[in-house]
Every structure is written in C-alpha cells, then in structure tokens.
Amino acid sequence: MTTARTIPVVLTIAGSDSGGGAGIQADLKAFAAAGTHGTTAITAITAQNTVGVRAIAPIAPDIIRAQVSAVAEDLGVDAVKIGMLGDVATVQAVAAALDDLPAGVPVVHDPVMVAESGARLLERAAMRAVIDEILPRATVVTPNLPEARALAEDETLDGEALARAVHALGPQWVVVTGGHREQATDVLFDGDAITTLPGERHPDGAAHGSGCTHSSTLAAHLARGADVPTAARIARSVTGDAVRDGLRDLGAGAGPVDVLGVGRRE
Ligand SMILES: Nc1ncnc2c1ncn2[C@@H]1O[C@H](COP(=O)(O)OP(=O)(O)O)[C@@H](O)[C@H]1O
Ligand SMILES: Cc1ncc(COP(=O)(O)O)c(N)n1
C-alpha cells in the first residue's frame, strides 16, 4: 500500500444505479465534492431510473471481494462506505472483505432497504445477516426513519428511543437521518449522548440519492480526519444543499440530488 498519500481515498461498496442518481454513482460524486478520491466495489447492478427499478443482478461474492482487495492493496483505504447489499451471500462477502482491511479503517453503513421509488433493494431474508454481520463492524450506521424502525423491529419508535434501539445492535455510532421526519433533523447517538443535527427542510427539492450522498459525505470527512460528530454535521448540511439544488427536471420521478452544483453551471 502507498504510504505517502496526500488525497484521502474512500471505498464505496454499493450497488450501481443506471440513472446516475443514487448508489455508486452518487457516492463517487459525494467523494469528489468532499475532496477525496473514490474507489468502488460494486455489489449489484440495478436497471433503474427515477421512476423505478426494472431489474437487479447481484455480483458474485468472489468478484466483490476481489474488487475490495484490488483497490485496498494498491490505492489504500482511509474510510469505507457500504450501501446496497441485496442478499445474504453479498452481506457475507462484504463482512469477509471488511475483515481483510487494515484494522481501524472507519466503516459507514447506509442500510439501504427500499429505493425512493418503492423497489426493495434488500431481500427480507438478508435483514438478519445485516444485523449480525455488518452492524457490529460499523463505525457509523445511517438508517432513515423506516430503515431504523425495521432494524429495531418497532414501528412506534422515533428520535432518541429509536437511535438507542439501533445502537443496541452493535454499531459505535448511529445517525437516524431526517428525510422522512417532520423537521428533517438527523439524530446522532454514540451510546452515551444524543445530539440533534437540525437543518432546513427543502420540500421542493429532489431527493433521489440523498441517503447515499449523506453516508458518502460522512465517510469522506472521516477519511479526511474529522471526528464523527463533525463529519455527521457536514454530511447533514451538504446533503440538505444537494437536495435543495436537486435536478428536479430530470426524469419523471424524484430527480437526483446535485452535490456538485452541476445545475448551477447550466
Ligand atoms: N427534503 C429535504 N430537505 C433537507 N434535507 C433533507 C431532505 N431530505 C433528506 N434530507 C437530508 O438528507 C440526508 C439523507 O436523509 P434521508 O432522506 O432520510 O435518507 P434516505 O435517502 O436514505 O431516505 C439527511 O441528512 C437528511 O436530513
Ligand atoms: C443502487 C442503489 N442504491 C441505493 C439506492 C437508495 O437511494 P434512494 O433511497 O435515494 O433511492 C438506490 N435507489 N439504488
């Protein structure tokens, strides 16, 4: 591994969104916006646009592990973001790949379950594997409200109680993201103190890829040396702006977030 790197390297292990709004494509944009170099291990290819997901092809477990080791051994890895996992075999391959990385590399997991358009991206049977194999290996887990409730197996929880229930599953930190909450306030918990990360809600924005952008921005700032509360605060702010600036005219469904300010250059 190269030792004298100046640009932090962030690895995303996630699915491909052919529409370019979420998944690997959103992650690379967020990494670039945060001044880091992104590397990728693709877990699944989705045939997807802003309206829906037409097909999903999982990538073979040995190819997932080969992608991780190829980039980690040559370019190094300062933080990892994990997104769509899809099925049990993929969860197991990713857990094994994490164990092959140098100790101490921060791992951020956005437990992607259902796309903004409504399609399931994590098989129901794989939820247990995520809880058993990925959450205990995560530095930070970043579920939205429905994902956090599914992990906690309690549809009535919100806010602090919900963050506590997810934390009990093993990650060091939890951020319950606010896109599905009334105030769009993120809730951060480390097992000790609750911190709320408020921000303006942009109801007229475009939010396809907001969760991916949030977790990738958080991972990129950990790679740059920020602590978790600082990285989570920046991720809330950057993602809020990317939703506000979202490309609402693209596609018939929820348009992609714009973390690079591409729309402003028009
Ligand atoms: N309409 C919105 N206005 C401002 N911020 C938003 C909006 N929707 C989501 N966010 C922010 O984007 C980030 C991702 O949250 P969320 O939308 O809950 O994730 P997901 O895409 O997984 O559902 C969070 O920091 C959240 O507060
Ligand atoms: C490959 C892939 N990964 C993640 C998401 C979730 O993103 P969103 O909830 O914004 O649709 C997605 N739609 N596709």
Image (spheres, grey):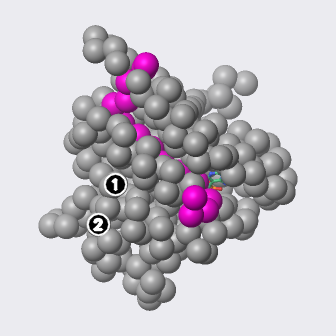
Question: Is residue 102 left or right of 63 when viewed as pictured?
Answer: left
Foreground of the two, 171 or 60: 60
Mark 2 neighbour density, 10 Å: few (under 14) some (14–19) many (20 or more): many
The Cα atoms of the two marked residues, 2 and 1, are separated by: 8 Å
Q: Is residue 77 magenta?
A: yes
**Above or below, 77 relative to 244:** above
Q: Residue furthest left?
A: 192
Question: Badge 1 is on which residue?
Answer: 138
Q: Are marks 2 and 1 in contact (CB under 8 Å)?
A: yes
Foreground of the two, 218 or 239: 218
Question: Is residue 190 left or right of 62 when viewed as pictured?
Answer: left
Position of the N terminus by quadrant: top left
Q: Dot 1 lies on which element?
A: loop
Q: Position of residue 62 (x, y in %)?
A: 58, 42
Question: Badge 2 is on which residue?
Answer: 170
**Above or below, 239 relative to 92:** above
Q: Write down the region rendered in magenta.
A: 74-89
Position of the C terminus by quadrant: top right
